[in-house]
């Protein structure tokens, strides 16, 4: 069993995009890779759930890091 809450998703045409906010304290040098490692599986699960619920493919998955002050694409 996996439990979680999708922060944001939106539809453009016939595809979806997924955004998840992260507050982890990570360094500027390696922070993006750290976040990707930590959360890739979580966003994979979210994308799978959205596709099952809507029948639409998830085209983009992005983390927003408050520590880095920027988006981290997956």
Image: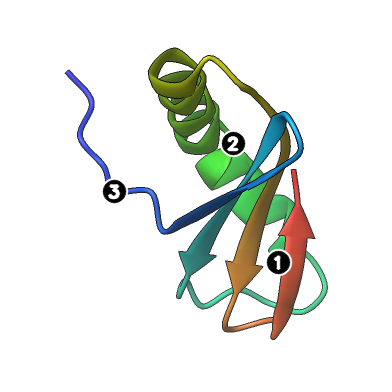
Vertical arrangement, residue 49 with respect to residue 73, above or below: above
| Residue shown at 53% from the left, 28% from the top | 47
| Residue shown at 69% from the left, 81% from the top | 68
Quadrant of image for the C terminus: top right
N-terminal-most mark, 3 or 1: 3
Residue 31: numbered disc: 1
Say which of marks 3 and 1 sits in front.
Answer: 3
Give the secondary structure at mark 3: loop
Q: Position of residue 53 (x, y in %)?
A: 39, 20
N-terminal-most mark, 1 or 2: 1
Q: Position of residue 59 (x, y in %)?
A: 76, 32
Give the secondary structure at mark 1: helix
Return the residue at label 3: 5
Other residues around mark 2 within 10 Å, as few (<14) / some (14–19) / many (≥20): some
Q: Are marks 2 and 3 in contact (CB under 8 Å)?
A: no
Return the residue at label 2: 40
């Amino acid at each position: 069993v996996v439990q979680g809450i999708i922060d944001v998703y939106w539809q453009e045409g016939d595809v979806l995009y997924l955004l998840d906010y992260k507050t982890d304290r990570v360094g500027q040098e390696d922070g993006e890779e750290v976040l990707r490692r930590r959360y890739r599986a979580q966003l994979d699960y979210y994308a799978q759930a959205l596709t099952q619920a809507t029948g639409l493919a998830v085209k983009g998955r992005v983390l927003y890091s408050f520590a880095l002050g920027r988006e981290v694409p997956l």
